[in-house]
Image (cartoon, rainbow, N blue to C red):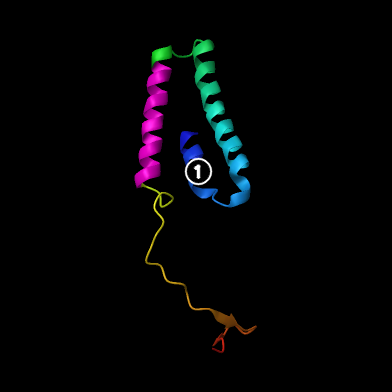
């Protein structure tokens, strides 16, 4: 869930979704926190085990988000693809300049 919150931070970049992004991030973090607390209150796990798992999951999520996704760094040096008109037959025709 922490990875999902980080992913939403990187992907939801359009201007109209600032509040929506924060609400979704808060929601997924609260779901993960509720799950952790329910495991303790149901006597399924000891609090230190849940804390260790939550910490380990957070570290792994940050590492995966930082080094294994292309969300963090925007690729520079990209050029636009040439624009072609596509006819009904599927043959490409260049647009007039």
Q: Residue at x 46, y 72 (%)?
A: 80
Q: Residue at x 59, y 31 (%)?
A: 27
The vertical placement of 18 against 87, above or below, is: above
Describe the element under mark 1 as helix, strand or loop: helix
Question: In which quadrant is the C terminus drawn?
Answer: bottom right
- Residue occupying the far right of the picture: 88
Q: Quadrant of residue 94?
A: bottom right
Name above or below for residue 80 compared with residue 92: above
Magenta residues?
Answer: 49-67
**Image side of residue 64 versus residue 40, left or right:** left
Q: Is residue 65 left or right of residue 15?
A: left
Q: Main secondary structure of the magenta part?
A: helix
Residue picked out by circle 1: 9
Q: Residue at x 47, y 34 (%)?
A: 2
> Residue 38 magenta-drawn?
no
Q: Residue at x 55, y 36 (%)?
A: 25
Position in image of residue 79 (x %, y %):
42, 71
């Amino acid at each position: 869930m922490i990875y999902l919150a980080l992913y939403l931070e990187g992907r939801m970049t359009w201007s109209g979704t600032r509040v929506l992004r924060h609400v979704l991030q808060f929601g997924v973090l609260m779901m993960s926190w509720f799950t952790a607390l329910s495991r303790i209150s149901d006597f399924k796990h000891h609090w230190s085990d849940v804390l260790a798992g939550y910490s380990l999951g957070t570290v792994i999520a940050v590492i995966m988000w930082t080094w294994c996704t292309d969300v963090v760094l925007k690729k520079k040096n990209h050029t636009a693809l040439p624009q072609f008109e596509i006819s009904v037959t599927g043959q490409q025709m260049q647009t007039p300049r």
